[in-house]
Amino acid sequence: MAFRFLHTADWQIGKPFGGFEAEKRGVMREARIETVVRIAALAESRRCEVVLVAGDAFDDNTVADRDVRRTLDAMAGFSGHWIMLPGNHDALASVSVWSRLVRLGAGERVRVADRAEPILVGDGRAAILPAPLKRRFEAADLTAWFDAAETPAGAVRVGLAHGAVANRLPAAADGNNPIADDRAERARLDYLALGDWHGFVEIAPRTVYSGTPEPDRYPANAPGHVALVEIDAPGLAPRIERVPVARFDWRIVRAELFGDAGDVDAALAAVAEPNRAIVQLVLTGALPLRERARLDGILASWEARLFDLRVEDGNLQDEPDAEDLDAIEMGGFVRTAVDRLRAQALDPADPERETAALALRMLYVEHRRAKAGD
Amino acid sequence: MYLKSLSMRDFAGVAEREVPLFAPGLNVVVGDNEAGKSTLLTALRAALFQKHRGTSEAVKALSPYGRAARPEIAIEFETGGTSYRLSKAFIQKQSALLEWSGGRLENDAAEEKLAELFGFAHPSKGESKIEAHQGAFGLLWVEQGRAPGGIDLGAGRNAVAAALEGEVGAIIGGENGRALIEAARAMQERFYTATTLKDAKHSPLVAARTELAALREALAERQEKRRLYEDRLERLSLRRASLESYLQDDAVGRAEAALAAAQSRARAVESVRADHAEAERALLHAASLVERAEEGLARRRDLARRNADAATLARDAEAALAERRTAALGASEDARAAATRRDEARRAAELAERRLSSIEVARRLARLAGEAERLERRLVQAQAIAAQIDGLARDARGPSIDAKTLERIEAAGREAREAEIRLAAASPSVELMPDDGRCARAADGAGLAGTLKVTGRQEIVLDGWGRIAITPGGGAGDLKRTFDEALAELARRLSAAGVADIDAARLRERDTRERAIALAGARKELGAAAPEGLAALERQRAELSAEMAAMRSPDGEAHASAQGDVDEAQADRRRAQDAMRVAEQALEAARASEAAWAARLARLEADAVHAKDAAARLEAELRAAEATAPTIALEDALAAARGERDRRVDLLALRRRALDEADADVVTLDLKRREDALAQVRASVDELRGEVIRLESELGVQGASELGAEIARLDGEIAALEPRVDRLERQARASRLLHATLTQAQREARENWLAPIRAEVEPFLRMLHPGTSVELDEATFDVRVLRRGGVEESFARLSQGAREQIAVVTRLALARLLKKGGYPAAVILDDALVNTDERRLERMHLVLRKAAESLQIIVLTCRERDFRDLGAPIIRL
């Protein structure tokens, strides 16, 4: 019988989302626990023998007891065993969330992988080799012991670790807690279940980051999944299924606007469920002032529809055209002022360039407002 | 514009009037106050700007008062090179007709055309203020009394602006521009204070920055807490590892085992040390036994030796005693002989002494006899003197008068004498010259003869005659009494002195004196003869006699030998005495020798007895000792003790080696080390355990503090707030830049704009008020300030005359400017210079003429005289 398990990591329960409004924060924190409920249900429905949590189940060792309790409650939907590995956020320090987890009633189905020794599961058909982090940052490769680890003959060997696979992750990933990229091979692992990188990626043969099941940032590296893994026998390739479980859809939407603010609508129309979307809208290009003013209205409407919208418009230029300027009183000193601000905004050498562009836009808006008031 | 002609009918107070042909330049219209001069201006305004269909009160006012009429007005004018004829009728059958050579428009179309020609806008429905809808003509056409109030640009503003635009290429920007500046200022003041451009208190940027700073501070505080938490965590981990290492190594057990081993080694060393000490003690004991045996033997040998010595001594003493006894006998003999010799010498000396003594006594007796003789003589002499003195003294003890007593007696005598003389002088003298045989007698019968001084009652018995009683008078009685008293005093003194009269007193006094002298001389003599006194002399004589008596021995031998040679006797005595002394010395020496011998002998005898006793005692002692332990036995015991001691010395050396080999110091040090080590290990374990428990408890408390979440939240909030602050900063900067740019542009525009007005105004001003210039308000063109000779004056403070002149001048300048800009400008001044003095009026004529070179100017006035010399056509109403 194949050994089937669910691989997840980086729940980061208790993450505060300080950059969001208080109301949204609560929802986002709640969502992470609900995701655990879904994971438990998935493991249950897919008859997994064990769920491996490859580190950072908790955002911090000082996470509130209430969050720990609710996480345990969320895990109750799975009748099998949970093997939870301390990661860098919840390292197995002298005093840690793990000691509280046990104290708060984790029960025997929740096992904290707190030692570098094999854990036999599935009636001895599989041996889990954990590499728990005892501190936030380890300079050494804690998975090294896997190579020489003795496991029962015929048992599937599954490594469980948290860190950065050397030479494989993008430069942006931090290099702490290194893991050799050929560890699976050297340690004769059938599968190496990893945590730390928040996107789903099979980074080396039989070496997989499940990513976080509930995304917490924008990068489009396929977060929001768990891995359902099935291994028929030692040495046989694992069957890996990527299953989405996330509630929130974090995404970066890019729109290049040239003259028409309405293009933003087109770009955001791609968001399937706006009320579950946390969007960073990156706007580039250039708009005449009237379109810029229209853009504000369009964005306001999207802001109301999306769960969260952040607009990055630093590279969206104002490009007042003749029509804009005609709309402004073109006589007298106003004309002079507009010309000066425009010249300043267009001069790449002017340190006040952006300020001038903004001033021009403000002038335009004020002018329109005055007109509207007329 | 050139207004050519104007006619009206039923217009206000004017039934009908036609003003024919104005000149293109300067015109003066003269009319009395009620001649309808102002109506002219009203009609002109109505024609051009009032809608013919108008129903407002202003339009109604065009009718003649109290009469329904159809006010009509017609004007001819030329503008843009075209001549027009315009006629309008109001209120009834309203109409408007504009005709020119190329066209004709009626009613509204005509009015539209007018608005176009004159650059104004008709009021919207409901608006009625024509003043606001006549373009620049509100500015150029000045009603009576308005000039001193200033320019009051009003609705002419746009027209002026348009004209200026043509002139300088920039205009103010209108209401819209001002509104924009206001909006920019409002935006700026969200962030900055209006005056200093510092951060405003209510600035959202300041609030955001404050919030950001607070968040950062809170974050730093949490991070510090976090750091402390992690430090503790790290320390707990280290302590646990240390504790575990102690426990795993069984450090306490090991230390205890090591201590037990060390203690066992120490006990072994202790035993060796005890053996060594025992050997030392045994050796000391053996040595002391040897010492005692040696001492015992030595004492025995000493006793034997002393015993022998004592016997010798006793024998020697006996021998010496015998020898000394013989010597002592000899000394006694010598002493006896010396005594005999001394006695002989003593006797010889005594003899010599006696002889010398007799001689000396004899000599002394002789001398004493002489002395006694002399003393006797002195004594006899002195006794004689003494007898004399006695006699004198006895005399002296008889009646005597001393000098003082004599003096008193003599004084009393003198007084009696004087009293007598005074009495005699006062007393009658009675010379008795009896006849022969006759006698006179006193009462007592005594015969009286010669001269009789009668000092008192004197009875003279004259024989035969009887008695004559004579009583002197004239104080004779008192004198008599004084005389009697003096006599009585004298008699008393004489009596007291024991003499009869003064002479006797004198004699006795001299006698007394002489006796005293004689007594003193005798006493002196006695003093010389026996200074020590008579009694002393007698005592001396008695003593001398006694001495001599004593010296006289009963026999006369001494006296016999008294005649011998003293010197010889003395020499004999000396020799005898010397011999005696020698003999005495010899005796003394012999006796001393004898005594010495006796003492020595006694000593020797004692010594001998003592020596004998000692010898006997020692012998007894020795005998007793030997009886107890014979010497040979002592010697054997000593030899045995020495043997034992030597064995002990060897044993001690053996033990010493054993002790050395046991390395006792090292074993002791090691023991101490093991003890300390155990204590230290136990303390460390306790301390580590305590700290682990404490840290676990502390960390446990902080465990669920959500510190990490707090930090992450603050990080997030800061990350969210930073772009907001950034955005606000950009907005703040932009608002400032916008406001600054707008105001700067406005300022520049105004400066540019006013330049042509100044250029037009100043030549006129120079004509009117040389050396002055005006400053105009950029927005209203009102004259703000007049500058004269560097001094600024507010327009409002100028005299009415000056104000109206300047207002007119400015209007003329603006009109010229408008004209240049293509505006159909023409100026109408209705009594605009009524406050101007003659001299200025003259100047104003020049100004008007100059302005009229390019403008039509119509001056309406009621004072023809003021403009008589203007040189312009005058139209009289």
Image (spheres, grey):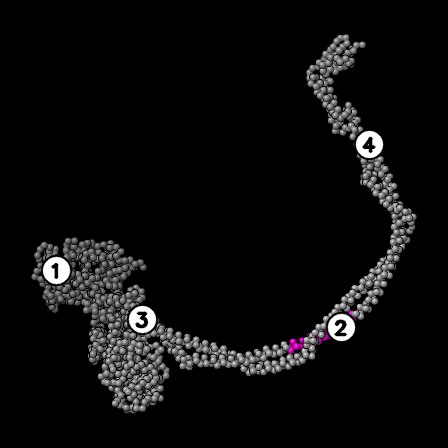
User: Would you say residue A5 sits in the magenta stretch?
Assistant: no
Visible residue check, residue A284: no
Q: CA distance from mark 1 to mark 3?
A: 68 Å
The reply to whether label 3 and label 2 mark residues of one chain is yes
Closer to us: B763 or B191: B191
Which sits earlier in the primary sequence, circle 2 or circle 1?
1
How crowded pointer 2 is (Cα within 10 Å; few <14, some 14-19, many 20+) is rated as some
User: Mark 4 belongs to which amino acid?
Assistant: Gly
Identify the residue position indicated by label 3 in the image. B215
Magenta residues, start to end: B290-317
How crowded pointer 3 is (Cα within 10 Å; few <14, some 14-19, many 20+) is rated as some
Q: Give above or below for A215 relative to B779.
A: below
Marker disc for residue B629: none
User: Would you say residue B315 sits in the magenta stretch?
Assistant: yes
Q: Give above or below for B208 relative to A155.
A: above
Q: Which mark is in front, 1 or 4?
A: 4
Which sits earlier in the primary sequence, circle 4 or circle 2?
2
Q: Secondary structure at mark 4?
A: helix
Q: CA distance from mark 3 to mark 2?
A: 128 Å
Q: Which mark is in front, 2 or 1?
A: 2
